[in-house]
Every structure is written in structure tokens, then in C-alpha cells.
């Protein structure tokens, strides 16, 4: 632990009382974790636990990052502008206003949403106002103790690796502690900071409406949970405009609350977060339920089957949406439509795209790479070829209006699709079963291994090094002769990334990577079969093997 650095923080004048109290109450172990490094900045921006210290999210680390971002923007454009939004998390609004004031103090024009708004609406604002960058204050679906700082480029995508490295270099030149932090009001008065108006919001709503492919007025009853986040207003407004959807909202999770009192992990991928919505769906007799995460870029759903709700995985929902868009969308193009998915997303997309003569592109994990593909199409004058992009972690996008996953778009698409199926006397589950009968059962599992702190980073690095020794050196008979793709070393045609894939001789596959935003190692398991039982048995054996490989 850097005692001198800790003492500098303890004696910093003007430090917010909350930070000072937390700092004085910390144990040596907590101090070490808070100060052993600077909070990492990468293509995902910043993300970390709230609190004092260089390895924490607080006003000083946010200010430092913003100065670095501002200097980068000024190096690219003499008169840059930036759009800013925030979610419902603790201190999100404080960080958003500090970011706006810091950039404005550097002479940068700022467009700031006056209220919390979803991540996709930030991406949209960047493009709508022709900004050079965007900042979204959010930690997405992480627990309440986290917050984060996502940075977007002028294309509305999260920043590239090259831009992140340049910004990081400028951040590292800045001192973390400063005597005074800028206030927002003077820059609002001067007009350097402008609140984003209703015209931007209406333009976003118009784009979502325009993405409907087969509007259906058949009555649909749904239960919705914003999980105490940003989706409450835009999602409900868009469903109101559909005109055929009765929406019941989970009252405990309706209003913004950064403490997320009913779901410690506000993530629609996790059943616990969906529990209240599921109970309300059974109680009210609704057709289905769905939830959006706090920054409303992920959406998860389940279908009522008599007296219980069956949740749909991110992979299966992506396939249902892709199938729906292929069946009802405009496929008449001189060149085939384009679908983009990540390498860890279901391979069931392969036969489905082949059936409809759709070009399927695989990219690295992270929706920015899907957004990047839209940009490539746009550059070639072929943006209208883009049909759909999705990832297994509940991220979907059926339009080019933003360059990140969009749960407002996904919620409307879900309800449109469900209403059409209901008019045919079917549910989403019925259609999913039809697709499995046609293409086979594609099973997938996600394993996560948490390794926190300085020691955890070392453990994850060691596990990846061991895996890179190759299948024959790992001492597992089933792995011998497996096909290996190392995305850090091999020429895959994709950016270099710390990701390793192994495909066994029997077709089972697993992909391992450290998370870019959490202290976790993630392993994605793939197996297919004639039915769920066959695929499940293959996944069970694969899981046992991978758990052994991912232990320190």
C-alpha cells in the first residue's frame, strides 16, 4: 500500500464528507484495494466500486478521466462537442454534471440530458447532435456498489482500442486530486452546456416506431420491470404508442433507485432479478413478462405457461427475433441482408441465416464490434443491408439509429413479435420449439469465476497462460486433438483479444476470456444435439472439464 498516497487523500482539502468518512473508516485491506492501482480505463471506459481511492469511482477519478477525454477531443477537433447522460445509480447524476462542467471548463460544447436516460438514447444523441464524443454514466447491470463511465465516439459506438489508448495516455498525465472541482451552473448560464430537448427524444421514438416490421393490433398483456432504472419512461411510452399492449409495471421496481432494493444484481439475465415480474405475470394472467437493466440496453423475458413463467435465454431470444425479422422483414435487396453476432453467441444463427440467404458476420465480444460493422456498411453506402445484431448477454439491435444494444428497440420488437404469434394461436415458446424441430437443439451455458482484487487479476492471467499451453499439455484425454483458436495470437481477421477457443473432436466447444468490466473469468460452453436432453448431457460433461481448467 502506498502510505504517502493514502495520507494525501486523507489530508485533501474540500473532499466531500461522504468520501472522507469512508476513507477514515477503511481497514488496511480495503485501503490497499482502493489505492494499489489507478482504476482501469479501456474501450469500456471506467467501471468500479464507489468510494475513495485511485481504484474507485469518485468525483476525483471521474474528473481526471474527463480531463484526459477533453484533451483527446481537443487534439482531434478544435471545437468539439460531447453528449452526456446517466442512469439511476448512486452518484450518477453528480458524475454526469461534473463531466459536463469539466468539459465545458475546457471550452468544449456539451449536450446534457436533464433527466436520466438509457444508454441507447445517449448513443442516439451523439449522432443526432453530430457530437465528437459521448459519455454515459452507468455500471450497466452490476450491483449497487458499482458505477461507471462509458465513452462513445462520434459514430455512437463505444470508443476503439486506439482511441482508448490515446485517452488513457492523457489521463495518466493528470493528477487525481485537485483543489477545486468545476460547478455546472456557470456553464449552463454561458450556454456551453445545453440541456437536450424533447426534439431529440421524439426523434429517437420515431426511429423505434419506424423499425416495426409487421405491426399487429392483436391484444397482448405484459408485465414490465425497469429494475429501478432508466427504461421506465421510454419503454412504456413506446408500448403505449403501439396501441395493443396492456402493460402492468412491477411497482417495487418501477421508480429509479440506485440501491436496487429488491434485486442485488439488477440484471435480467438472472432469475432473481426477474422474480417479482414472474410472480406478477402468474397473478395477473399476463401473456409474458420482461425486464430491462438499469441503463436499459439489455432486455430479458419469460412466457407464462399456466401457473409458472418460463424464462427465455439471450441466445434463444436472439434467434426468435432473427427468425421474426427474416420472415416478416424486407429481404428484397440486390445484396443479402447482414446479421452480426459475437463469437460467444449461439451457432443456431448459422442454419437460420443460410435458410434466408442472409450474410452472417461474427465479431469479438462487445456490442461495439456489432456497431462497428454497421459503420462499415454505412461507409460503403449499404447501411440498409443491416438486419439485426445480437449477443448472448441479452443485447439486441434491429436498426442503425444507434450503435449499441437497445432495450427500448428490443422491448417493442418483443411485443410486436409476441402479438403476431398470439394472433396465430402461438407463444414465443411454441415458435422456439418449431425452430428446434427444424434446426436441432443448440445448447449453451455461461460459467463465471470471480477473482477479485490484485490477486484475482494474477490468478486469471495464470489460468489463461495455462490454457495457452495447448490441449495436449492440459492432461485431459477428451481435449487431445482439439482445434484451438487464440484470438490474442492467431490471425483471425478480428482485433487481438485475450480470448481462447477450443473445439473438441465431437463438436463441443468452449471459449474462455477475462471480463473487460468485472473481476471475472468467463467460460462459454457450446453443444448441440437432436433434443434438449442430448445437448444437456454433452454440456454437463463439458462443464465439469472446464471447471477444472478454470480453477487456480
Image (cartoon, rainbow, N blue to C red):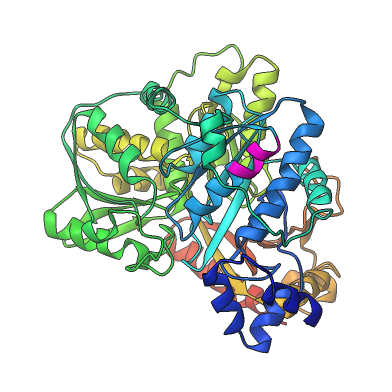
Q: How many marks?
A: 0
Name the residue at 65% across, 61% down.
Answer: 515
Name the residue: 32% across, 50% down. Answer: 290
Residue 268 at what x, y percent from top left? 40, 57
Task: Give 512 or 66, whichever is nearer the viewer.
Answer: 66
Reply above or below: 37 against 351.
below
Locate residue 217, reporting x and y percent: 19, 27
Q: Dividing the image into 4 quarters, which one contains the C terminus?
A: bottom right
> Which residue occupies 20% across, 29% down?
243
Find out whether residue 103 is within the magenta segment: yes
Front residue (pair 380, 346): 380
Residues rendered magenta in the picture: 101-106
Residue 148 left/right relative to 153: left
Q: Nearer the viewer, residue 260 or 460?
A: 260
For residue 378, which quarter of the picture? top right
Please provide percent x and percent y for residue 506: 66, 61
Q: Does residue 493 appear left or right of residue 128 in this picture?
A: right
Q: Residue furthest left?
A: 284
Amino acid at each position: 500500500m502506498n502510505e504517502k498516497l493514502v495520507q494525501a487523500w486523507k489530508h485533501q482539502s474540500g473532499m466531500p464528507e461522504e468520501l472522507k468518512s469512508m476513507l477514515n473508516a477503511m481497514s488496511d485491506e480495503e485501503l490497499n484495494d482502493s489505492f494499489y492501482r489507478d482504476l482501469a480505463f479501456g474501450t469500456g471506459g471506467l467501471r468500479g466500486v464507489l468510494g475513495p481511492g485511485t481504484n474507485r469511482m469518485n468525483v476525483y477519478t471521474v474528473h481526471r478521466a474527463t480531463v484526459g477525454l477533453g484533451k483527446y477531443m481537443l487534439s482531434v477537433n478544435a471545437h468539439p462537442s460531447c453528449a452526456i447522460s446517466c442512469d439511476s445509480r448512486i452518484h450518477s447524476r453528480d458524475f454526469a454534471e461534473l463531466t459536463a462542467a469539466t468539459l465545458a471548463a475546457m471550452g468544449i460544447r456539451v449536450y446534457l440530458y436533464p433527466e436520466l436516460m438509457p444508454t441507447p438514447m445517449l448513443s442516439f444523441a451523439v449522432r443526432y447532435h453530430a457530437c465528437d464524443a459521448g459519455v454515459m454514466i452507468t455500471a450497466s447491470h452490476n450491483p449497487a456498489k458499482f458505477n461507471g463511465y462509458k465513452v462513445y465516439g462520434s459514430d455512437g459506438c463505444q470508443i476503439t482500442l486506439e482511441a482508448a489508448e490515446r485517452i488513457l495516455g492523457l489521463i495518466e498525465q493528470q493528477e487525481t486530486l485537485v483543489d477545486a472541482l468545476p460547478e455546472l451552473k456557470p456553464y449552463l448560464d454561458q450556454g456551453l452546456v445545453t440541456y437536450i430537448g424533447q426534439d431529440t427524444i421524439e426523434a429517437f421514438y420515431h426511429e423505434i416506431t419506424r423499425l416495426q416490421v409487421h405491426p399487429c393490433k392483436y391484444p397482448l398483456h405484459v408485465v414490465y420491470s425497469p429494475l429501478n432504472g432508466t427504461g421506465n419512461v421510454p419503454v412504456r411510452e413506446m408500448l403505449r404508442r403501439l396501441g395493443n399492449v396492456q402493460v402492468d409495471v412491477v411497482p417495487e421496481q418501477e421508480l429509479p433507485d440506485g440501491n436496487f432494493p429488491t434485486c442485488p444484481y439488477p440484471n435480467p439475465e438472472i432469475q432473481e432479478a426477474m422474480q417479482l415480474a414472474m410472480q406478477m405475470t402468474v397473478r395477473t394472467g399476463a401473456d409474458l413478462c420482461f425486464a430491462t437493466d438499469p441503463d436499459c440496453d439489455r432486455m430479458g423475458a419469460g412466457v407464462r405457461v399456466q401457473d409458472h413463467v418460463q424464462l427465455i435465454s439471450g441466445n434463444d431470444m436472439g434467434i426468435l427475433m432473427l427468425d421474426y425479422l427474416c420472415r416478416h422483414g424486407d429481404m428484397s435487396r440486390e445484396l443479402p441482408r447482414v446479421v452480426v453476432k459475437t463469437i460467444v453467441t449461439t451457432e443456431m444463427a448459422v442454419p437460420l441465416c443460410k435458410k434466408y440467404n442472409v450474410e452472417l458476420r461474427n465479431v469479438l465480444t462487445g456490442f461495439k464490434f456489432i456497431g462497428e460493422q454497421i459503420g462499415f456498411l454505412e461507409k460503403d453506402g449499404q447501411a440498409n443491408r443491416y438486419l439485426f445484431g445480437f449477443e448472448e448477454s441479452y443485447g439486441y439491435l434491429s436498426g442503425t439509429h444507434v450503435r449499441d444494444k437497445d432495450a427500448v428497440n428490443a422491448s417493442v420488437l418483443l411485443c410486436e413479435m409476441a402479438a403476431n404469434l398470439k394472433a396465430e394461436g402461438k407463444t414465443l415458446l411454441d415458435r422456439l420449439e418449431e425452430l428446434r424441430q427444424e434446426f436441432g437443439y443448440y445448447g449453451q451455458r455461461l460459467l463465471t469465476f470471480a477473482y477479485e482484487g490484485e490477486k484475482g487479476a494474477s490468478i486469471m492471467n495464470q489460468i489463461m497462460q495455462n490454457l495457452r499451453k495447448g490441449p495436449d499439455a492440459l492432461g485431459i484425454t477428451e481435449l487431445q486433438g482439439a482445434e484451438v483458436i487464440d484470438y490474442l495470437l492467431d490471425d483471425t481477421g478480428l482485433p487481438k483479444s485475450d480470448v481462447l477457443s477450443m473445439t473438441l473432436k465431437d463438436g463441443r466447444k468452449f471459449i474462455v476470456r477475462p471480463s473487460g468490466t468485472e473481476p471475472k473469468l468467463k467460460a462459454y460452453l457450446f453443444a448441440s444435439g437432436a433434443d434438449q436432453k442430448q445437448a444437456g448431457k454433452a454440456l454437463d460433461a463439458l462443464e465439469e472439464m472446464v471447471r477444472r481448467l478454470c480453477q487456480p
